Amino acid sequence: MDPTLTLLGALMLVISILLSPLSSRVGMPVLLIFLVVGMMMGEDGPGGIQFDNFELAFLIANLALGVILLDGGMRTRAETFRVGLRPALVLATLGVFMTAAGAAVVARWVFDLEWLTALLVGAIISSTDAAAVFSLLQGRGLHLNERVSATLEIESGSNDPMAIFLTLVLVTLIGNTGEGATWSVLIMLVKQFGIGGLAGVLGGFAVVELANRVRLTPSLYPLLVAAAGISVFSATNALGGSGFLAIYLTGVVIGNRHVRMMPMILQVHDGLAWLAQLCLFLMLGLLVTPTDLLPLLGSGLVLALALIFIIRPLTVVLTLWPFGFNRRELGFISWVGLRGAVPIVLALFPIMANLPQAQLVFHAAFFIVLVSLLVQGTTMAPLARKLRLEVPAGEDPYRRLPLDTPGAGDHELMLFPLRGEIWETPRRLSQLRFPENTAVAGVFRNRVCLQPKGDLEVASGDTVAMFATPNVLPELGKALSGRHAPKYLAERAFFGDFVLNGDALLGDVEQVYGIEFDDLPPELSLAECFARRTKGHPVVGDTVTLGPVTLVARATNSDQVTKVGLKMDSSQNV
């Protein structure tokens, strides 16, 4: 092997990683940086690397996408299915069909293509890369309300298999115009989703059982999960199913079951997913010749803008309006139509099949991704803040260490550094309100471990070590949070000055606060008001305006609002 190639490859990785902080500083998607570095190192850039091995690129891209989907699945919480499953699945199935059809109409017009080829272009660019969206939003410190975040999170893993299926169908139809084409398409549909879904669920339970039964060095558990996930992915593809659907579902099962050393697994897989995305976008940048994109400048821009401003918003409104989303939520989800690696990878299918106009399809998909990353990726975080879709969030622990012993159950050791203005004034441990079934393990100050006595005062610069279970992490994070938040996200400004129980009756609220609620029965509870407003699926941050007051959902349990904030100033409604 030529050492020059390995040197250039390593330097590309180093340069991309060093440039990644620009993402949070200028609002540029980090994946766009990786893509541009790859293009700069290609044959039209100063790097001058000639890379046109589409077979190798296809193999690497599939493995990279498998790793990314496995990590995304493990981070998908089953609790989010309560509010996000149905709308996300509709958006990921019917929405993908509608997006592909709308894009095909525009592609046929601007590129002067046959209908099947235009539909192929539409199918290739029909899926969004919500995983890239969340990496951008999290880098900017955003914490979206659960209805929006859950919908986008589930969509990120379920719309890729649908787009892949449509692409394979159209490649088959274009390459095979015989009488058996229809039957082959139907068989492919059943095999892709049937085998993929079954293999994913069974594979997930098998990986969980395997990880919990064997005793390994802690650092080997993440590698075991990664290798087993890729095994499920490859075996499903070999059987004719959707490997992408299978590995995503495998991740979902693993992430929602008790698995030994799970925090370490997630930490390592976060790095693996970043490495996969980095290598994938660098390689895709090398594949394209920028000068080949110039002839598509006008027509490609028309298609990209139509996708961003017309097709995606129309699809979102038509598919999600029955699920109780408000206009701000629909507007943001419409804008989160970010195209990422999947469309470029899907554009390799026509090239591998030697279809006519395959190069045009590839370059068109690449151009659409570039425009999407530039237009949507750079404006997504500011738009989320402008639409005020954030909710107050607690501090995440600096480190989570699982206690790998049966007697500890699900408890972990969590480290919380105290920082921010709230901790400038020392506070006693006995004054802090921690969730049940938690305990302070110790307090670290100037490299000294202090015993956690009730009269011990903690302040900024200290690190509090807690024994706690993952399910109380949000509440625990709020108790130890010191992050600087915008004024409108402060607890009182967001939720109001008064806290009520969800089962409080309107009649009682009228008597206590001297408020009159017109046309509403006094025996109606506050929780029932939210259930009516949100069609049975309330989330923290939902608001209900009742005359001169605004009710804000402060805490929920399943589909029930348990704590309600009351704002007396109705001018703050959103």
Image: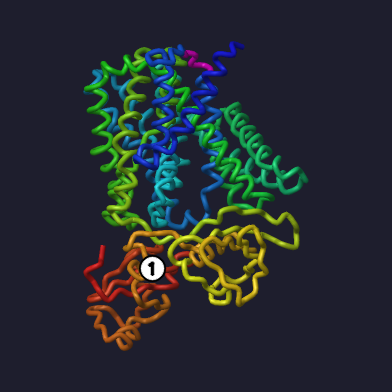
Q: Position of residue 459 (x, y in %)?
A: 53, 67
Residue 372 as seen in the image, left or right of residue 53 = left
Q: How is the image coloured?
A: rainbow
Q: Position of residue 419 (x, y in %)?
A: 49, 60
Q: Position of residue 38 (x, y in %)?
A: 43, 23
Q: Which residue is situated farthest in the right direction here?
A: 215
Which residues are the magenta region? 51-56
Q: As displayed, is residue 460 above or below residue 69?
A: below
Residue 562 found in image quarter: bottom left
Front residue (pair 331, 180): 331
Dot 1 falls on a residue whose secondary structure is helix
Q: Position of residue 542 (x, y in %)?
A: 35, 64
Image quadrant in which the N terminus is located: top right
Name the residue at 61% across, 59% down.
446
Q: How many marks?
A: 1
Image quadrant in which the C terminus is located: bottom left
Q: Is residue 120 magenta?
A: no
Amino acid identity at mark 1: Glu
Name the residue at 30% across, 30% down.
371
Q: Which residue is situated farthest in the bottom direction here?
A: 511
Front residue (pair 343, 133): 133
| Residue beneath disc 1 | 491
**Does residue 172 appear in the picture of this structure?**
no
Name the residue at 53% across, 18% down.
56
Residue 174 found in image quarter: top left
Q: As displayed, is residue 192 above or below residue 437?
A: above
- For disc 1, the neighbor class at 10 Å (few under 14, some 14 to 19, many from 20) is some
**Does residue 67 appear in the picture of this structure?**
yes
Q: As displayed, is residue 326 above or below residue 382?
A: below
